[in-house]
Amino acid sequence: MLLQRFSTNPHLASRSLKPCSRHDQVLSHSRRLNALKRVIEPAYFQDIFDGAADRIFNDSGFLKREETMLLVESVSSMEHVFKSLELIVRHLENRAGTDINDWHHRKKYYMRLCELTAIKLGRPEAVLALFGNLQRFQISTYFGKEAILKLGPQGLNPAVLLRIAELCKMQRGPSDKGVRTAYSAVIYVLQSRALPGDTEILAKAQADQKALRTATVKVGTGDASQMIPASTSVPAATSVAMT
């Protein structure tokens, strides 16, 4: 019956004669990623890391997209997290001077690492390490806003949310638009959650945002007396270190 229906349907018959397109032959990115996730086991982290590290540290190679996501999804400890971050940093160093722009993919790895550590493991150190070293990890301050909006609704500690915005401000200054959007994101998330423990941090974020606007206005009018330094040293506690 099914064969008869197929043979008498000219639309289906004509389609069956067409060669498979490139799109039909290759799985979409999301389907490939889901397939990769199904075979990932935490015990495989070291194998993935060793293979990538040999190419990147010894041959000045680059991280592959799917390889990096496999690495990130395989982390099960803070040691794994910081090893992954160091590998990404070396990838960036090797990439210097090329026309490769992988920010669209790299921010996915960063975000997933933040989720796995801050939410799953309950350890925000990786989040603070990333945003405490914007230059080293080549991160835009607008990513601070994205991380706050992503992690806040999942229950990230309000003090950590505010710290993300503060670290962006310390390194890029009050006039940076990404810094201002990060503070706005903190306020939005805390107001939306409306949790009792968020009240104090919310008030501080609102006060900081008001001061930020005042400082920005004074800088714009030529009065730099109240300007927050555009670049300050990051506290040692937020620097990346192997554990």
Image: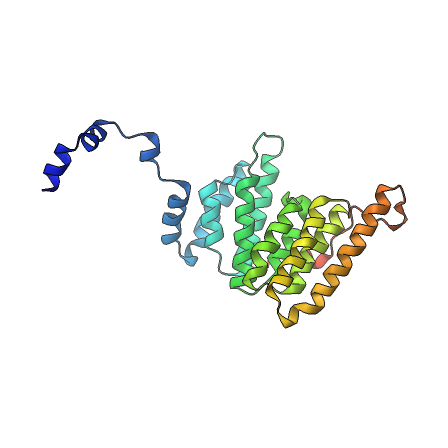
User: Could you tell whether 8 is left or right of 183 in the image?
Assistant: left
Residue at 67 percent of width and 52 percent of height: 182
Q: How is the image coloured?
A: rainbow
User: Could you tell whether 92 is left or right of 45 in the image?
Assistant: right
Instruction: Please identify the quadrant where the N terminus is shown.
Output: top left
In the foreground, 113 or 82:
113
The percent position of residue 75, horizontal first and vertical second, equals 49, 56
Q: Quadrant of residue 149?
A: bottom right
The percent position of residue 219, horizontal first and vertical second, equals 85, 44
Q: Quadrant of residue 12?
A: top left
Residue at 35 percent of width and 33 percent of height: 23
The percent position of residue 209, horizontal first and vertical second, equals 75, 55
In the foreground, 63 or 209:
209
Q: Is residue 181 above or below residue 15?
A: below
User: Could you tell whether 195 is left or right of 47 in the image?
Assistant: right
Q: Farthest residue in the bottom direction?
A: 196
Q: Is residue 228 visible?
A: no
Q: Is residue 43 visible?
A: yes
In the foreground, 116 or 223:
223
Residue at 62 percent of width and 67 percent of height: 194
Instruction: Please identify the quadrant where the C terminus is shown.
Output: bottom right
Q: Is residue 100 above or below residue 176?
A: above
User: Could you tell whether 227 is left or right of 140 in the image?
Assistant: right
Number of callouts in the render? Answer: 0
Residue at 13 percent of width and 33 percent of height: 7
The percent position of residue 100, horizontal first and vertical second, equals 56, 32
